[in-house]
Amino acid sequence: MTIPEKFKHWLSETIDGHVLGLFRLVFGSFMVYNTYSYYRLGLIESGLLAPKILFKFEGFGWLHPLPEPFMLAIMALMGLSALLIAAGVLFRWACWGFALSLSFFLFQEKSYFNNHIYLFVLLGVLLSFTNADHFISLRRGRRFDAVPRWQQFILQAQVMIVYFYGGITKLKPDWLINREPVASMSGIFPAGHWLAPVFKSDAMVNVLTYGGFLLDILAPILLWYKPVRRWALPVFIGFHLSNSRIFNDIGIFPFLMLSALILYFETDEVPFLRRLSKAGAAAGSGFWPETGVVTRNTLIVYFAFQLLFPFRGFFLPNPMDWTGIGKNFSWRMKADSRPVQEFQFTIQHPVTRQVFQVDVQSFVNEMQMMNIACDARSVSAFARMLRDEAAKKGVEGAIVKARIMVRYNGRAPQLFVNPDVDLASVPCSPFEKLDWVMPLNE
C-alpha cells in the first residue's frame, strides 16, 4: 500500500466523536461572547456607520453597510447561530449562518482585519462538514457512535496552518537577528504591570522570539507526533497564556487556540471524555456517515487554497509587510510593529497653490488611521476620497499629499510614502511596483 493510500485509509478510519463535540461546544460559546463584544464595542455604529470612508478588500467594493436596524439584525443572527452551534441544534444551518454573518462584517472594512477573525469564519465553515452535533449536544433524534477520522483532521489541519505559517512569517532577519517586533513590544509593555519585570527582561525577549518561532515551525511534530504531544502541551499552554497578557488586541484568540489543542487528542486520551463516551455509547446508532464525492472534492479545493494563497505576497512586486499588499489572509501574525510618529494630510488648490491641513479624525477613526499607516493602497484610497470631497466644495483636481512617519520594527522614524507626490493620482495596482511608496531603510 502506497503512502497516499495509507493516508486515505487512515482518514477513513472511525473514531469516537466526543472530542469534536467538546470543541464545537467551546467554539460556539466563545463565538457568543465574541458577538457580544462586537456589540458592546459599538462595531456597527462607530466602526462601520460613522466613518466617511471604508477601506475595502479587493473584490469587495460592492459590499456596503446596511441601515443600522438591519446591521443589528445580522449581528443578532450571528450571536444566535453561535449559540445554536454550542447547543448542537440546527447545526449546519447555524454554522453557515455564523460564518456568513461574521464574513459580512469582516469584509466591510480592512482596518479591522485580524487573523483570528478570519480563523473564526474558517472554523465555522469546516465544522459544517462534520457531525460534531451528535456529541455533547442538545440534538434530538438518531446519533452516531463514531465519525470518520477526517472530520477531526480537517480542524486539526486548519489550526496547524495557523501555527506553521506563523512560523514561516518569522523566517526573516528582523525576527531572527534583530528580535523584532518582540523587542519593541517588550519596550512598550506597561512598566507598572506586575509582569513587567518578566516581559521586559532580555531573557524573556529571547524566549518569546526564538521559542515562539520554534513552537510555530515545529507544531506539526509537537502536536501530531503522539510520543511528544503530552510533553509539548504545557509549552503551548504557556505560549498562549503569555500572548493573552502581552497583546491587548487579540481578544479571545489565545483561549480559542488553547481549546483547539483538544483536537489533537482522541477521546480515549481524555479521562472525562472517555467516561462520557462509555456512558453514552448505548444511545448511539452504531453507524457513521459516508464521505460524499462533493464533500471530498470541496475540502481538497479548500485546503489547496489555504496552503497556496498565503504565499501570494512573495510573488508580488512590493514588500508585503512594509506596503501591506498580500499581507492579509496570510497568517502573518504580529510580524511587525510600526508606531506612527507623524500623520498628516494636506490638500492643495491646483490653481492658487493654497494648502489646507486636513482634519483626518473628522473622516476616519483611530483604527482606520493605523490601517492607512500600514497599507499603501489605503493611503491612495483616502487621498482620492479627500480629492472628491474637495470637488464637492468647488475645488476640482485638488492635489493631496501626506507626510506619514513610522518606526518600523525598532528602526529610526522614516517616511512611508513620498510626501511630494499627489497621492490622489498615483497607481495602486498590487501587480505594479508602487514607486510612490518610500523604500524601507534597512
Image (cartoon, helix red, strand yellow):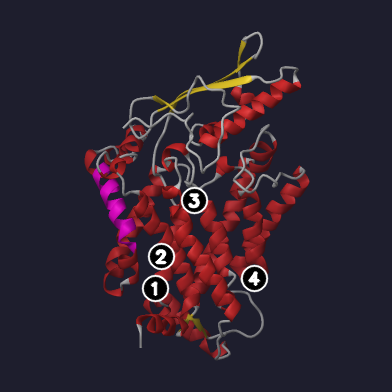
Q: What's the CA distance linking mark 2 and mark 3?
A: 18 Å
From the viewer's perspective, is residue 431 above or below residue 29? above
Image coordinates for residue 344, horizontal then vertical, percent: 53, 21
- Density class for disc 3 (Cα within 10 Å; few <14, some 14-19, many ≥20) is some
Q: Of the residues tagged 4 and 3, which is closer to the observer?
A: 3
120 and 335: which is toward the camera: 335
Q: What's the CA distance linking mark 1 and mark 2?
A: 8 Å
Q: What's the CA distance linking mark 2 and mark 4?
A: 23 Å
Precedes in sequence: disc 3 or disc 1: 3
Q: Are marks 3 and 1 in contact (CB under 8 Å)?
A: no
> Dot 1: what SS?
loop
Looking at the image, residue 183 sits to the left or right of residue 367; the answer is left
Looking at the image, residue 104 sits to the left or right of residue 7; the answer is right
Q: Which residue is mark 3?
A: 115
> Dot 2: what SS?
helix
Image coordinates for residue 249, horizontal then vertical, percent: 48, 43
From the viewer's perspective, is residue 261 above or below residue 5? above
Precedes in sequence: disc 2 or disc 3: 3
Q: What's the CA distance linking mark 3 and mark 1?
A: 25 Å
From the viewer's perspective, is residue 390 above or below residue 99? above
Q: Which mark is residue 261?
A: 2
Please say whether residue 353 is visible from this viewpoint: yes
Q: Which mark is residue 92?
A: 4
Please say whether residue 195 is visible from this viewpoint: no
Looking at the rendered image, the quarter that the N terminus falls into is bottom left
Image coordinates for residue 257, horizontal then vertical, percent: 44, 59
Precedes in sequence: disc 2 or disc 4: 4
As shown in the figure, which amino acid type bears the numbered disc 1?
Phe
Image coordinates for residue 140, horizontal then vertical, percent: 66, 80
As shown in the figure, which amino acid type bears the numbered disc 2?
Leu
Q: Which residue is mark 1?
A: 265
**Residue 218 colored in magenta in the image:** yes
